[in-house]
Amino acid sequence: MPKQKTHKATKKVLNVRNSGSITYKKSNGNHKTAKDSSKQVRQRRNQGTVSKGDMARLKSVI
């Protein structure tokens, strides 16, 4: 059976850390943030982590 190809769009969005966890940049934080509370804008600066249920599925794609 041939090797599975990397899904390039997913690879550009997700980052695999040394610990094995997968992170991504949260959406809606670039512009037009004046309507949001400062707490919402601040929380979007942090990277999000993928849940354990999705991790195995996404690691095979990356």
Image (cartoon, rainbow, N blue to C red):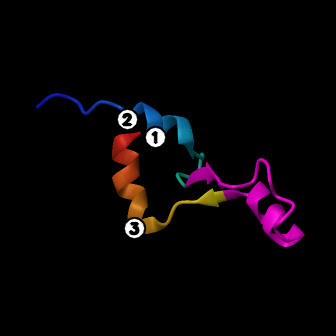
Residue 3's x, y, as percent? 22, 30
The residue shown at (75%, 53%) is 29
The residue shown at (39%, 50%) is 58
Q: Which residues are magenta?
A: 22-47
Please determine whether, in this image, residue 13 is positioned above or below residue 54: above
Q: Is residue 15 left or right of residue 39?
A: left
Instruction: Determine if the magenta segment contains residue 28.
Output: yes
Disc 3 to disc 2, C-alpha distance: 19 Å
In this view, the residue in front, 4 or 40, is 40
Residue 11's x, y, as percent? 48, 36
- The count of marks equals 3
The residue shown at (43%, 31%) is 8
Instruction: Determine if the magenta segment contains residue 16.
Output: no
Circle 3 SS class: helix
Q: Which residue is mark 3?
A: 53
Circle 2: residue type: His
Cβ–Cβ below 8 Å for labels 3 and 1?
no
Cβ–Cβ below 8 Å for labels 1 and 2?
yes
